[in-house]
Image (spheres, rainbow, N blue to C red):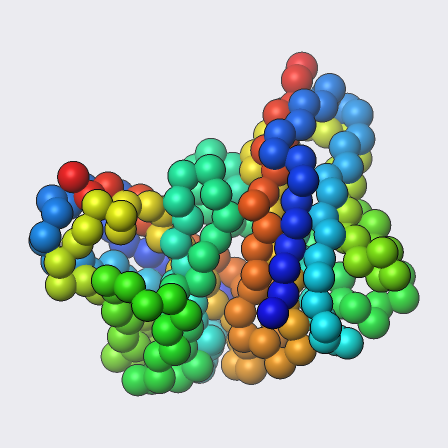
Amino acid sequence: SQTIHQWPATLVQPVGSPLSLECTVEGTSNPNLYWYRQAAGRGLQLLFYSVGIGQISSEVPQNLSASRPQDRQFILSSKKLLLSDSGFYLCAWTRTGGTDTQYFGPGTRLTVL
Amino acid sequence: AQKITQTQPGMFVQEKEAVTLDCTYDTSDQSYGLFWYKQPSSGEMIFLIYQGSYDEQNATEGRYSLNFQKARKSANLVISASQLGDSAMYFCAMRGTNDYKLSFGAGTTVTVRA
C-alpha cells in the first residue's frame, strides 16, 4: 500500500529565514505530486504540482519554490519567509496521469513570527 | 476554470442522525470528477468518496453517499447515522477534464452532538 510522509509536523520560523519542507511517497512509482497551502479556517490553495523529476508547475506566483530531486520526493522551499507564508502545508499524490483521487499527507503547520 | 461553492460554513447534527452537506459546482467541462474530503482537527485530509460525471449511479461508501444531480450541478454529501468522530471540516472538490489539480470549496464544519 502507498503512504505519504511529511516533515516536519510543525515549524516556527522567524521572518526572513529559509524554509525547507519535505514530502515523500512510498509504495508507488512516478506519482504526480502536489503542494497545497491552507490558511486558518479556509480551503486549500494549490501552490505547485509535478508530473516527474525536475518538472514543476507553479500555480500561484509567490515567495515559495518547489523541487523534485527524486521520483518520490517533493520539496517546498523559500529563501526568505514572510509573515504571510504562515499556514498549513499539505502534500498530496496521485497515480501517474494525475486524474485519480489525490491522497494527502499529514501536513506541516508553519508559523512565521 | 472550475468553481466549487459550499454555502454552509457550519452545521450541528445529533448523534445517530443523518446530515446533508451542500456542494454546487460550475464547469464547462463535459467530463469531470467530484470528491469529498474530511479534515479532522489533526489536519490530515481524508478522502471519503468520488463521483464521476458520467457515473449513472450515486456513489456510496459505507455511511457516506453522494447525491449527484448533474443538471443542477450539485454533489451533496450525505452522512448517515452520525457519530461523534464525524465532527470535522468537510471539503467538496472537483477535477476537470485532463486536469491535474483539484479545486476546493471553502468547507463546512460539522459538529456532532451526543
Q: Is residue B29 left or right of residue A33?
A: right
> Could you say which quadrant of the image residue B11 lies in?
top right
Quarter in which the C terminus of chain A is drawn? top left
Q: Is residue B6 left or right of residue A29?
A: right
- Tell which of B60 and A79 is nearer to you: A79
> Could you say which quadrant of the image residue B10 lies in?
top right
Is B65 located above or below residue A77 in the figure? above
Residue A30 in sight in this render? yes
Q: Residue at x 56, y 82 (%)?
A: A97
Q: Please state the horizontal and vertical placement of residue A8, each as a whole percent of the image.
A: 25, 50
Residue B58 in sight in this render? no
Q: Is residue B68 left or right of residue A27?
A: right
Q: Residue at x 80, y 58 (%)?
A: B73
Q: Residue at x 35, y 84 (%)?
A: A55
Is B40 located above or below residue A110 in the figure? above
Total marks shown come to 0
Q: Please state the horizontal and vertical placement of residue A10, each as a whole percent of the image.
A: 26, 43
Q: Residue furthest top?
A: B114
Q: Please state the horizontal and vertical placement of residue B107, each as a whole percent of the image.
A: 58, 43
Is A81 located above or below residue A34 in the figure? above
Q: Is residue B96 left or right of residue A72?
A: right
Q: Residue at x 13, y 58 (%)?
A: A80
